[in-house]
Each structure stands twice: as C-alpha cells, then as structure tokens.
Amino acid sequence: MGQIQVVGAGECGLPLALRLQRGGRDVTLITDRDAEAVLAGSVTSTQVKFARTVALEEEAGLDYWAGTAPAIAGIRFTMVVDRTAVAGWSGRFSAPARSVDQRTVFARWFAEFEASGGRVELAEPSVDDVDRGAAVHDLTVVTRASRELAARFPVDPSLAVPSTPVRKLAALYLDGVIPDPDGLGTYVALPGLGEMVSTPALTGAPGQERACATVMFEALPGGGLDVFDSADTPAERWRLAREIIDRHLPHALAARFRDAELTDAGATIAGAVTPVVRQPVGTLPSGRAVLGGGDVVCRMDPGGAQGANSAAQCAAYYAAAVLDSPDRSFDATWMAATAKPWIADIARPAALWTMTLLDPPPALQRLMDAARHDQARADAFAETFIVPANMSQLALLQP
C-alpha cells in the first residue's frame, strides 16, 4: 500500500507530500499553480508559525529559514481609543515565532518535491477528477478544495462556529517599517472597529529572501476599518491602510509606518473568511472515502494566528499515521481514527482560541486587563498562541 494522492499544495498538502515521499511512498500532488506561479502571485496570509510548528519543520528537514527569518519574541498588546493608548502590556513567548511569506515557503517546498522525483499534476480538479484519481490510489487526502469538493465533507455540528465572517480582512507586506525595539509582534485593539496586527517577516524568492514586515487589519464588518472592498489595486489598499494608521493609531506607533512601502506588486490581499468545521472523512460520488486535512476540515479567521500552525500539525499527524500503517487499508475507519488526534489536540483548540480571542468573554477581558500589572499573566496569554489547548489554564490566572 503506497500510492497516495494529495490534493492541494499549501501549508498542509506540501509538507504532507514531502514527508510521505521521504518515507518511501509514491505521491501525486495535485495543485493549480507551480512554483513560478506561486512566486509571481499575491500574498496569501500573514502567517505566524509558533515554536512547536517551527520545531516540526526543523525535525522534518523542511525549515530553510532558521538563519534568515526575523525572530518574533512575543506580543506587544495595545488598546487604543481616539488615537490614545489606554492599556498596554507585553507578553513573551517561551521560544521565538517567525513569519515567512507563504509564496517563499511554497515555492521552496514545491521545488524540493519535484527535485526529489515527486509527481505533480497541474489542475483545478473537479469532484469527478478527484474521484477518478481516488480509484487508482490507495489514499486520497484533500487539503484544499473547491466549494463543490468541500461539500463532500459534512459539517461537524458538535462545534458551533459563526456562519458569516467575523472580520473583514486586509493584509500587506511592507518594506521600511521601523521594527519593534524588543522584537515583538504588535497587536492593536481598536474597540468598536477591530484590530491591527503587525509582525516582522521574511519575503522574496528562495535564495533572495529579505526581512520585511506584515500588517493585517481585522475589521468588524461595517465598521470604520471595513474599507477595503472597493480597493482593487495594491496601491489603493496601501493608501487606505495608511489612512487608517494615521487616523486611528497613536503618533508614536503610526510613525513606525511613515516611510513604509509595499514589498512588491503582489504584496496585498483583502477579503474575508467564513469559519467552518467539517468532519474529516468525505464521500465521493462513487462512494469512495477521502481524508480531509487543514482548512478543509477546520478553517478559522486568521486573527487567532492558528491556520498555518494547525495545517502544519495536520501534515505531521497524517504522515506519521500513514508511515506507521504499511500494511493497513486506508478505509474510512482508518481515516477517522487518523484525524481524531489532530482534531482533538490541535484543530478544535485552535478554533476555540480564535473565537475566544475575537469575541473575548468578560473573564478573558479581566485577565488581559490584569496583564498590565502581572508579567506572568501577560506571558501566559502570549503562550496560549503556541498551545491553544492550554487555554483552560488561563482560568487559573484570572484576577
């Protein structure tokens, strides 16, 4: 048993394909873009990978940016009202995080997969295409899906998630941002408007990477930050972003972005994410079972900074299960059992943390307020980004 079809070449599909290939499996990767197209396209996220995700990639030989990506030491939280900081504190991670442009990451991994003899099919597969492929492969894993293909995976009713986007989003990659003096990520809460998040990052073609910064606006729908729908060019998005920065941020913080400019022609993206949690086993028209992973199973707003981490963990969990089952039929029962630990340990806690962070209950608000005067609480809050499953431990620190 060894022929495996992986649909999607992102934070889950690419490392899964590479891990399986290195484990001796025959892997076909189906994606709509090759490395050249990925690099020439627009940014896809402002992903931050935390310590245990970085460690996973290091252990798997997938980390090519340890010496070049800027370290993110923690979070500097500021609540701003009328351009005035009314609360603030800093929480440090137990180990640094990092953010590397997914265009850079995917192009490097894609080239590695092809150079090692991996088969690539450039296509936007329909449900029937995936079904035909599943007929000649021992296992099909779907990590990216069209609406039609995603619908083959039933919605999981055991976790209620919002049925509409919680935030409207705009992300930009910038040169010329003055770094935080302590190497921290910037999290600005703007009550009634949304949030702005900025971190140091790395961008550029493999071998030509350079440091930069990312900025993401998380706008409450219909609020004062929700202005990007009408912006259809990178230049217009950056103009609107600068207006928000100048209008809503304290002078000292806004000054960090005064001389910034977009890193490249594809340095922006805008849109919204509708959260969804699906069951991990889908059924194709033929009745064949397929295994869902990454965003296909659990897709959340990026404001929780969990998407890339959850997808990377999924790839590691699934690859280990496949490589540990050389003589096992990859049937629906195996698929459900394989997905269960990832969902319980990683995906579901990530979803809960994201929903809690974007709509904080009074207990979390009190803890965040107390963090101004208690470094242990501030650090515990920051650490929950690394291990969302430890969110319940924050209750022990409530004032």
Image (cartoon, rainbow, N blue to C red):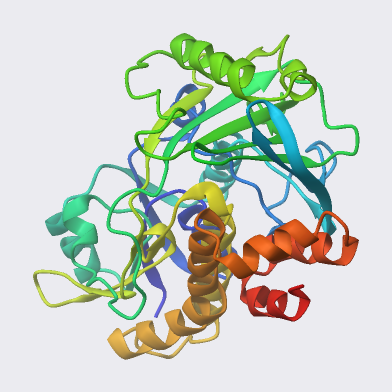
Residue 46 percent coordinates (x, y): 58, 39
Q: Quadrant of residue 299?
A: bottom left
**Is 245 drawn above or below residue 62 in the view shown?**
above
**Is 321 drawn above or below residue 44 in the view shown?**
below
Which residue is pictured at 49% across the width and 36% down the height?
Answer: 193
Query: Which residue is situated farthest in the left direction here?
Result: 285
Residue 238 percent coordinates (x, y): 53, 15
Residue 134 percent coordinates (x, y): 23, 68
Frontmost residue, 69 versus 260:
260
Query: Could you tell me if residue 264 is visible in this image?
Result: no
Which residue is pictured at 72% across the width and 59% down the height?
Answer: 368
Frontmost residue, 326 versus 305:
305
Horizontal relation, residue 383 to residue 118: left or right: right
Which residue is pictured at 19% across the width and 70% down the height?
Answer: 135
Frontmost residue, 191 versus 155:
191
Residue 39 percent coordinates (x, y): 52, 27
Which of the image's four quarters has the C terminus? bottom right
Query: Could you tell me if residue 287 is visible in this image?
Result: yes
Horizontal relation, residue 69 to residue 20: left or right: right
Counting every numbered tag in the picture gives 0
Horizontal relation, residue 193 to residue 7: left or right: right
Q: Quadrant of residue 339?
A: bottom left
Which residue is pictured at 24% across the width and 50% down the height?
Answer: 146
**Is 90 drawn above or below residue 3 in the view shown?**
above
Which of the image's four quarters has the N terminus? bottom left
**Is 307 drawn above or below residue 3 in the view shown?**
above
